[in-house]
């Protein structure tokens, strides 16, 4: 059950209604063929949505949503995290991957600061 209607503010300033299905598709794409239980994925998506709804704001920048997804994926699966980041950060060359992966902390797989 959604507590409030969320609006996503895109980087170009355009506004659109939050679409849970779009969020779910992007996360499931990043986790495709990864050894993550489908129930765990559902819990993760629900947790992200609850976090967005509890922020106290109805207008949420897409960048903030992307950061929350990356933070969550980093804790669950490094490969999915890098996959999502490659689209989110618009990697253009192999060097972009190399730089990003080299910034990952091997101890806790947290996103780079």
Image (cartoon, helix red, strand yellow):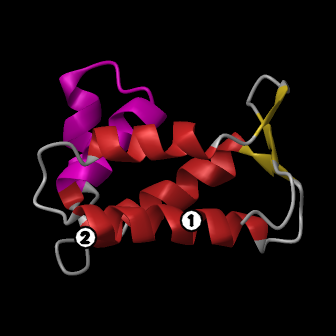
Query: In the rendered structure, are the residues bearing label 1 and label 2 in contact, judged by CB atoms less than 8 Å apart?
Result: no
Find out whether residue 75 is within the magenta segment: no
56 lies above or below 97? below
Where in the figure is residue 103, as x and y percent of width and height?
Answer: 28, 57
Q: Residue at x 26, y 20 (%)?
A: 93
Q: Residue furthest bottom?
A: 107
Q: Residues within 10 Å of mark 2 (few under 14, many from 20)?
A: few
The answer to whether residue 8 is left or right of residue 64 is right
Query: Which type of secondary structure does the marked residue at label 1 adopt?
Result: helix
Per the image, the residue denoted by label 2 is 105
Where in the figure is residue 27, as x and y percent of width and height?
Answer: 39, 47
Where in the figure is residue 69, as x and y percent of width and height?
Answer: 49, 56
Find out whether residue 97 is within the magenta segment: yes
67 lies above or below 90? below
> Is any part of residue 113 visible from this angle?
no
Per the image, the residue denoted by label 1 is 48
Disc on res. 90: none
> Is any part of residue 4 visible from this angle?
yes
Query: Which type of secondary structure does the marked residue at label 2 adopt?
Result: loop
Q: Residue at x 43, y 38 (%)?
A: 25
Quadrant hosting residue 32: top left
* Eye-nearest disc, 1 or 2: 1
Q: Residues within 10 Å of mark 1 (few under 14, many from 20)?
A: some
Q: Residue at x 87, y 61 (%)?
A: 4
Q: Residue at x 84, y 24 (%)?
A: 14
Residues under labels 1 and 2: Cα distance? 23 Å
In the picture, the quarter occupied by the N terminus is: bottom right
The answer to whether residue 56 is left or right of residue 75 is right
> Which residues fall within the magenta stretch?
79-102
**Magenta: predominant secondary structure element?**
helix
Q: Residue furthest top?
A: 92
């Amino acid at each position: 059950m959604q507590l409030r209607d969320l609006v996503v503010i895109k980087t170009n300033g355009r506004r659109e209604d939050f679409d849970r299905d779009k969020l779910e598709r992007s996360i499931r794409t990043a986790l495709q063929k990864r050894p993550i239980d489908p129930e765990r994925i559902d819990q993760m998506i629900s947790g992200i949505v609850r976090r967005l709804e509890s922020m106290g704001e109805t207008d949420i920048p897409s960048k903030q949503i992307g950061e929350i997804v990356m933070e969550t994926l980093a804790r669950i699966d490094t490969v999915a995290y890098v996959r999502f980041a490659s689209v989110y950060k618009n990697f253009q060359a192999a060097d972009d991957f190399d730089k990003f992966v080299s910034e990952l902390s091997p101890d806790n797989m947290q996103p780079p600061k």
